[in-house]
Image (tube, helix red, strand yellow):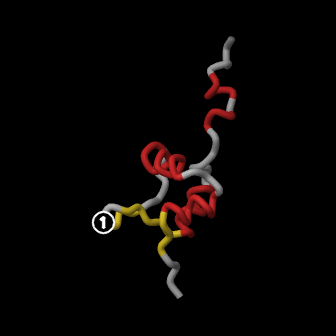
Amino acid sequence: MDERWLTVEDICGYLNVSNETVYKWIEQRNMPAHRVGRRWMFKQGEVDGWVRSGGAADKSASPDAQGTKGE
């Protein structure tokens, strides 16, 4: 059976994040998403793989990202 397409709202609930976060991830972190007309749609397996590979990791949590290295 094929995996069903998920909406932004579905992904927000699945990942427990806001829709603002999802749109930022699409634009800035190459979150796997597909345009269908005016809507963004997702395959859960693609999103799971992206999360596992570190795509959704909080980049500001590392010392390098905070700009404190070398001070």
Q: Is residue 27 above or below residue 14?
A: above
Q: Nearer the viewer, residue 2 or 22?
A: 22
SS at mark 1? Answer: loop
Residue 47 place in picture, x, y as percent = 55, 62
Q: Which amino acid, by three-letter code, is at mark 1?
A: Gly
Q: Disc 1 designates what residue?
A: 37
Rendered residue at 60%/54% (across/down): 53
Percent x, y of residue 23: 46, 49
Viewer-nearest residue: 60 or 12: 12
Relative depth, front residue between 58 and 9: 9
For residue 64, which quarter of the picture? top right
Please state the horizontal and vertical placement of residue 9, each as a whole percent of the image. 53, 62
Quadrant holding the C terminus: top right
Name the side, left or right, on which 58 lies relative to 31.
right
User: What crowding class fits label 1: few (fewer than 14 Cα within 10 Å), some (14-19), or many (20 or more)?
Assistant: few
Point 50% across, 78% down: residue: 4
Q: Residue at x 56, y 62 (%)?
A: 11
